[in-house]
């Protein structure tokens, strides 16, 4: 103890505080105990005996006070963080409720208008046959029907964004009752058919289903995971000659769904934080950092994992790993239902 030297005492105190800043409480205590034991063993090996100075015993209450202060501050931080999360959940739930009501109204009005389009089309055709002016052409009627369909899709997409935000705030796992069995080809097909591509974007995507595996989950959430990853990939290749590959395959370790782009790639410093909420590698193109954290929550809720590999100048790849469904959990009826929901070729390119 260097004769109770004040510099040594301050250094020891600083080390204790620094240890608990680096680790949480449990790991901090464990590291401290291991450090003391290693120090005692080293002292015993060098001196042949362990002689605990009286001065050290007198300082134990001081170290106990420091530890108590750290525990108190750590608990206070957890309480504050918990209260903030509860407040955020309450606010998000309130906003979600207020937003869902008008979105539901928009969908109902759009669908009601579409229900009357048949009669309107018949009246319009009757007026055309009698030579009335200012009638709508068949092309105009088709465009009107398409516009109403898009309104409904946009309302559904807005509800999905709300679900995505709420999922990031909830601290719960998915119940087995909500999760069903789906064929990955069907899910990919659903995502690609519903995604709102800009002109020329669909041609950049190649879909390669090497194995049409069955996974257990919530399909609408997996569709939205694919939405997010495809959206990120399209941002990465925007304005260039890039390509995007969506590939599904099975390995002995599990099922894999990967989405790879040939964009500029991400900086190595960004990768460890890519799934942290509000951290984005596409801030310049409008990324918010919410989508990837949502993807991780969903995939982990399906007992899977998601990872990202990237290199500057060589592109980025997101890999979703899903567990192989045990045969005893997937009977013939489940398999037939999952595989027959959509027919999809084993490999498909954009176009």
Image (tube, grey):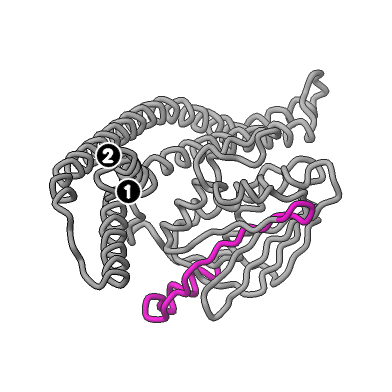
Residue at (57% x, 47% y) in the render: 274
Spot occupied by residue 300 in the image (x, y as percentages of width and height): 44, 58
The secondary structure type at the circle numbered 1 is loop
Residue 324 is a magenta residue: yes
CB atoms of marks 2 and 1 within 8 Å: yes
Please give left or right for residue 264 compared with residue 166 in the image. right
If you read the primary sequence from the N terminus, does the residue marked by circle 2 or circle 1 appear first? 1
Residue placed farthest to the right in the image? 241
* Disc 2: which residue: 74
Q: Is residue 1 magenta-colored? A: no
Q: CA distance from mark 2 to mark 1?
A: 8 Å
Residue at mark 1: 24
- Quarter of the view holding residue 48: bottom left
Residue 126 horizontal/vertical position (percent): 73, 29
Taking depth in this image into account, of 222 and 280 the one nearest to the observer is 280
In the depicted structure, whether residue 64 falls above or below residue 284: below
Q: Residue at x 47, y 27 (%)?
A: 105
* Residue at 58% from the left image edge and 35% from the top image edge: 288
Quick check: can you spot residue 136? yes
Which contiguous range is marked in magenta? Answer: 311-340
Is residue 276 toward the left or the right of residue 69 in the image?
A: right
Closer to the camera, 48 or 223? 48
Q: Residue furthest top?
A: 133
Report whether residue 118 is seen. Answer: no
| Vertical comparison of 93 with 305: above or below | above
Category of crowding for the residue at label 1, using alpha-carbon neighbours closer than 10 angstroms: few (below 14), some (14–19), many (at least 20): few
* Residue situated in front as seen by the camera: 278 or 312: 312
């Amino acid at each position: 103890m260097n004769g109770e030297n004040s510099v040594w005492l301050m250094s020891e105190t600083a080390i204790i505080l620094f240890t608990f800043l680096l680790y949480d409480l449990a790991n901090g205590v464990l590291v401290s105990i291991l450090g003391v034991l290693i120090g005692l063993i080293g002292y015993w090996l060098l001196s042949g005996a362990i002689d605990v100075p009286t001065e050290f015993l007198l300082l134990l209450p001081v170290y106990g006070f420091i530890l108590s202060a750290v525990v108190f501050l750590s608990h206070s931080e957890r309480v504050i963080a918990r209260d903030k999360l509860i407040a955020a959940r309450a606010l998000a739930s309130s906003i979600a409720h207020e937003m869902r009501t008008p979105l539901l109204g928009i969908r109902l009005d759009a669908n009601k208008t579409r229900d009357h389009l048949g009669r309107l089309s018949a009246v319009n055709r009757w007026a055309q046959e009698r030579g009335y002016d200012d009638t709508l052409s068949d092309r105009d009627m088709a465009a009107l029907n398409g516009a109403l369909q898009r309104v409904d899709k946009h309302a559904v997409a807005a509800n999905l964004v709300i679900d995505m935000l709420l999922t990031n705030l909830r601290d719960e796992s998915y119940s087995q009752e909500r999760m069903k069995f789906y064929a990955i080809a069907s899910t990919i097909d659903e995502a690609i058919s519903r995604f709102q591509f800009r002109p020329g974007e669909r041609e950049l995507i190649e879909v390669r289903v090497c194995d049409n595996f069955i996974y257990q989950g919530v399909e609408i959430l997996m569709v939205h995971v694919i939405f997010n990853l495809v959206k990120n990939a399209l941002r990465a290749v925007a304005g260039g000659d890039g390509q995007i590959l969506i590939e599904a395959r099975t390995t002995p370790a599990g099922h894999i769904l990967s989405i790879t782009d040939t964009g500029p790639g991400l900086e190595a410093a960004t990768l460890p934080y890519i799934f942290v909420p509000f951290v984005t590698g596409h801030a310049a193109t409008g990324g918010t950092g919410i989508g990837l954290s949502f993807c991780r929550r969903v995939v982990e809720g399906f007992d899977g994992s998601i990872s990202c590999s990237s290199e500057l100048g060589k592109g980025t790849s997101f890999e979703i790993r899903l567990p192989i469904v045990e045969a005893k959990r997937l009977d013939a009826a489940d398999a037939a239902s999952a595989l027959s929901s959509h027919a999809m070729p084993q490999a498909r390119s954009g176009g």
